[in-house]
Image: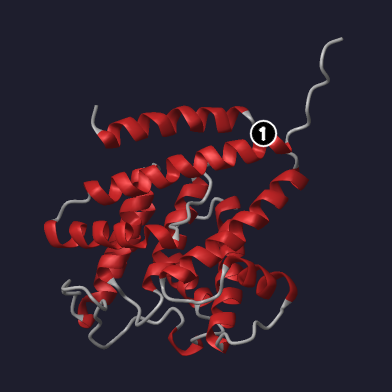
Amino acid sequence: MDALVNVITAIAAKKQQLDAMRPVSRAALLALQKSYDVDLTYTSNAIEGNTLTLRETAEVIEHGITVGGKSLRDHLEAVDHYNAVLWMRDVAAKATPVDETIVRELHRRIVARSQPDIGGVYSTLPRRIVGSSIVLPNAAKIPQLMKDFGEWLNKAAPAPATSFNAHFRLVEIHPFSDGNGRTARLLMNLLLLQEGYPPVAVRPEDRKEYLDTLQHASMKDDLKPFQTFMHKRLDATLDEYLAALQEALPQKPEDT
């Protein structure tokens, strides 16, 4: 069986298990979400070169602790991203339609303290992806490309594949002077949350495969490797999420 079809089938079965476990107690859910949201912040920032470890990221977010030897920008990026994750969850819970305005607001929050001057502002200058031969669209085309993208988002059928496609399309447009990857990953997770899935982290150890499949999609007009990679990450995340929820559920007394 095709690897992508195989993993989609596995995801569908695990989504049924997840739905059957709902509703989960608010206390258990909040504890689980806090851990996931710190992890989302750590992984997404680490992909882009932030040097804070997972533990350091948690200390900055939870206790406002300054980590010696780490830059101010690293600290600000952690706080910004975590706050953007919380806003993303709020948008998802309210079932707010996702459009161009939501994408720009996600970006604004991701750089609110670290780079406030570029928040939600489309670049007017040439952009390049370091280490890649991908040619990005002319900056003059960004407003129309983003308008079209926003309209597509508003009409796209809900499915994990749509979430991953949205991620790729935003990265391909690359509308902002910085923070495009972080915004694309949060947009992807916003759509996943609205569909009832847990958010997916792209881990630092997967960085090469992640970037290679994104580049392949752009250079070869072939999304399948990227879709396969992201579906596998969702499948693994569902395993983790189901196990964590199972632990959080009250245990039934054994028969005597």
The residue where tag 1 is placed is: 246
Judged left or right of residue 27, residue 49 is left
Question: Looking at the image, which residue sits at the far top?
Answer: 256
| Near-viewer residue (255 or 155) | 255
Residue beneath the point at 28% across and 37% down:
4
The N terminus appears in which quarter of the rendering? top left
Q: Is residue 70 above or below residue 145?
A: below
Residue 221 in sight in this render: yes
Residue most extreme to the left: 220
Instruction: Using the image as rendered, state which of residue 163 and residue 244 is in the foreground.
Output: 244
Residue 193 appears at what percent x and percent y?
52, 49
Question: Amino acid type of disc 1?
Answer: Gln
> Could you tell me which quadrant the C terminus lies in?
top right
In the drawing, does residue 115 fall left or right of residue 228? right
Q: Position of residue 119 (x, y in %)?
A: 46, 81
Q: Residue furthest right?
A: 256
Looking at the image, which residue is at 32% across and 58% down?
Answer: 210
Give x and y (percent) for residue 117. 46, 90
Q: How is the image coloured?
A: secondary structure
For label 1, count other residues whose C-alpha is less than 10 Å away and answer few (under 14), some (14-19) or many (20+): some
Q: Residue at x 27, y 35 (%)?
A: 3
Dot 1 falls on a residue whose secondary structure is helix
Question: Which residue does the image show at 30% across and 44% down from the upper left?
Answer: 228
Task: Place residue 68 in its image quadrant.
Answer: bottom right
Asked whether residue 23 appears in the rendered view, the answer is: no
Q: Nearer the viewer, residue 129 or 138?
A: 129
Callout count: 1
Residue 46 in percent (x, y) is at 47, 70
* Image-quadrant location for residue 183: bottom left
Residue in the foreground of this view, choosing between 244 and 140: 244
